[in-house]
Amino acid sequence: MAGYTNDQAGCLKFIFPPEAHQAIKDAWHFAFNDLSNTTETGAKEWDYGIFSCMSNVPLCLAVALCPTWGTCICYRNLESMSGKSCEVSFVNAFAASSVCLGSCHYAVVRGRFRAKYGLKGSPCQDCVCGCCLSPCALCSDTNQLMVLQGIQVPYLNLKDSSPAPATKEVKSSPPASEAKEVKETTPAPEVKETTPVPEAKETAPAQPDAEPAAKQ
């Protein structure tokens, strides 16, 4: 077949598509460089944490009692978290799992998802969730995707998975009593006192000098 060489690289290229090769490389790099990293990044808390399984009882029961249905949900989650098609997500996860790097591949995808939405967590936590707490992580991821991206899972949706709509701030007028109080406390404008103009006093006409005494 054209395009495949008769060596190890040709065999790997024949078995796995290029997307899967990159997924294996990313998981391998994670295992040897980021697995022990416990530094938390992100500032936003998860709406549904790793131990919030009972927030969605139908989903919890489906994951616990029906592994096939849980597997379908898992690959749909990987599709939504990575932005790649479900088929590519399935092949990538299968390829990584075939070389014992399935948990590391999940940690890579989950880490990018956290970074996109600023969710709290560390690379080590992502890997532990995929390796030791897979059912809990599946419920947490599914519920969180319902809130952030509005994904739908038949019969297993949250009762209210849509984020609360942003409300516009409405400035309300103060109560009548407060308005009245404001009016009463408003100081009256200062009135300048005007200096009264002094009234002009009427001057009596000058009296003529007394007549000279009568001549004796």
Image: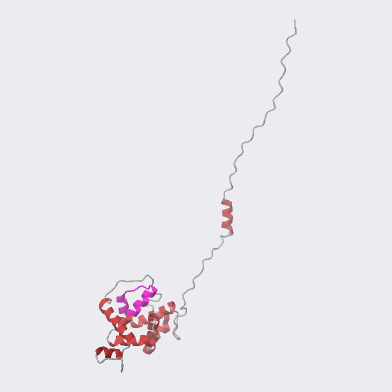
**Residue 176, percent from left and from top:** 59, 59
* Residue 82 figure quarter: bottom left
The image shows residue 142, relative to residue 38, as above or below, that is below
Residue name at image x 58 percent, y 53 percent = 183
Foreground pick, 48 / 141: 141
Q: Quadrant of the C terminus?
A: top right
From which residue to which does the magenta span run? 108-128
Residue name at image x 36 percent, y 88 percent = 67
Determine the residue located farthest toward the top in the rendered image: 216
Residue name at image x 35 percent, y 77 percent = 112
User: Is there any visible trace of residue 86 in the rendered image?
Assistant: yes
**Residue 48, percent from left and from top:** 40, 76
Q: Is residue 120 magenta?
A: yes
Q: Quadrant of the N terminus?
A: bottom left
What's the magenta bit mostly, secondary-structure-wise? Answer: helix
Foreground pick, 6 / 82: 6
**Residue 75, percent from left and from top:** 37, 85
Foreground pick, 202 / 84: 84
* Residue 69 figure quarter: bottom left
Determine the residue located farthest toward the front in the rendered image: 2
Q: Is residue 40 magenta?
A: no
- Would you say 103 lies left or right of 79 here? left
